[in-house]
Amino acid sequence: MAWPLQQGLRARAASIALVALALFLEAAVAHAGPVRAPDVILTGTLTRAAHETYTEVPFKAPPGVDRITVEFAYTGREQRSVIDLGLRDPERFRGWSGGNKSSFTLAESDATPSYLAGPLKPGVWKLVLGAPNIRKDSRADYTAKIWFDRKGAAAVGFNDQPLASEERWWRGDLHMHTGHSDGSCLSRKGAKVPCPTYKTLEAATARGLDFVAVTDHNATSHFGALRELAPYFDDLLIIPGREITTFYGHANLFGPTAFVDFQLGGPHAPKMADILRQVEATGGMISINHPGLPSGEFCMGCGWTAPDTDYGRIQAIEAVNGGNVEGPLSSIGFWEQRLNEGRRITAVGGSDNHDATLHPDKAPAIGVPTTVVRAGQLSQAAILTAIGQGHVFLDIAGTRDRLLDVRAIADGATAQMGDALSAPVGTKIRVDVHVVGASGGSISLAGDGAKLASSPGAKLTGADQTVSFDLTADGARRWLRIDVRGADGKLILLGNPIYLTP
Ligand SMILES: [Zn+2]
Ligand SMILES: [Zn+2]
């Protein structure tokens, strides 16, 4: 967008720029559609001639559109001008929001309530403008901004704006099921029924979570329910998710709402690379779920056995799944194996909850474990970016306040969990570990970088404590992770690694 700075007002350019910035910020806050410029802008005027009639304004939808978003505004409200809103696609009526919504969105999987989800046919669509009232000698100037999103465009989630804007640790659960797959709970009369999506979000907010991904098996139908619930749960970031559930392993896909194949070995996705290609086309993030579970009749397709997986295309691994932390069903070893191979893959956690009404102290209650993410704001883009960067630790019991913050400092550079730190041979590195809520527990080190440390661990005596130790780099590529164990030796906080590079 060009601002009018070119009109001989150089002396005032700075103040105009500030005004422009303020206008831009105001527009950004008021704006409901995608951040980029609209693909179509329709403008026009309704006068008394339109009173108690319908005006249909055509626009052309190109082929290959995945989502249509409309934002509508008009003038003349002070003269009681009213414009109601509806939509027709090339074949059928798609919805009527009257005067109750100024913006809405439609996709194959979901739509703003009042509108119908479904295929977005290319061709001539019509915005239907109803005019219950335009006074004599009055007018209403309208503007409709329309965005066409294609697969892989900046993901349109359920929240148009960041829910909060501050740099801090945000807590969430990335793995849950509702009645849109095999999530169930007791009905009002006590029968086991597919559990409504509302229950899952209610339990997540009751636990104090900041973000969730509801990940029904191979489904996209839950996106419609989440689209409806998001305005009500305005203190909870809802990230579109689904569990790609194959016979050779399960993986969560975060971000897109478009369909992605799961029929590994079938005609549409014969190899894992075919699924990954579809995932990448959507711009989504993928996380391998519970790879440490067995496969076979005990848990069909649960372990990760997909042949020819290119781990360079995997962003995250669910290192802790519900109550499967350490022991024979642990997935931590599978993740560490990838780290030992030189991959940088973020460990995340997921409750894999299948009953939102489960007692909150019991795994896999929603939020057990909690994935805790350091991000500059509570938005889909910020949280997924931070997960990709590894700025993450896992709170195994899903408390509201336990904290693990790790900083490695060398030659004036600081790395946090997930970051790489340049450390040629002989580099002295100081590691500061800030732990909250683990008094009586201990810090332990993991990874091949642990042997470089001056001390193998430390007891925690305070509720809020920072422990420091030193490392001397040996010039090799290493990874180093900090975990926190409780007084009983059980893992309570799992950190992501800091990567030492020569
Ligand atoms: Zn699974
Ligand atoms: Zn699951």
Image: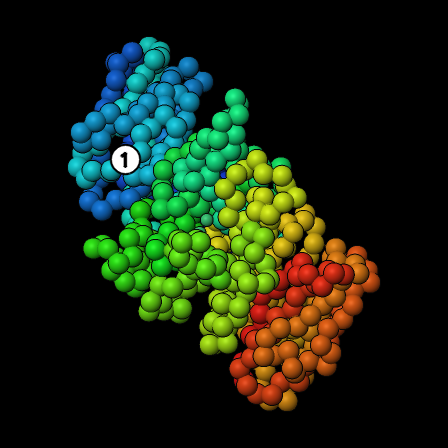
Q: Position of residue 148 (x, y in %)?
A: 29, 43
Of all residues shown, which one is farthest toward the front?
297
Q: Is residue 391 visible?
A: no
Q: Nearer the viewer, residue 279 or 191?
A: 191
Tell me where residue 271 sits by quadrant.
bottom left
Q: Nearer the viewer, residue 115 or 248?
A: 248
Q: Position of residue 179 (x, y in %)?
A: 43, 35
Q: Quadrant of the C terminus?
A: bottom right
Q: How is the image coloured?
A: rainbow
Is 158 rendered above or below residue 465? above
Residue 366 falls left or right of residue 310: right
Badge 1 residue CB within 8 Å of ligand 2? no
Q: Position of residue 453 (x, y in %)?
A: 68, 80
Tell me where residue 227 sits by quadrant.
top left
Badge 1 density bin: few <14, some 14–19, many ≥20, Cα 10 Å: some
Residue 160 falls left or right of residue 330: left
- Identify residue type, mark 1: Gly
Residue 140 falls left or right of residue 254: left
Q: Is residue 394 visible?
A: yes
Q: Nearer the viewer, residue 444 or 74?
A: 444
Q: Nearer the viewer, residue 240 or 13?
A: 240
Residue plotted at (57% across, 47% down) = 364
Which residue does the numbered mark 1 point to in the structure image?
A: 118
Is 105 rendered above or below residue 319? above
Name the element at disc 1. Answer: loop
Residue plotted at (67% across, 58% down) = 492
Residue 299 falls left or right of residue 391: left
Q: Position of residue 347 (x, y in %)?
A: 53, 62
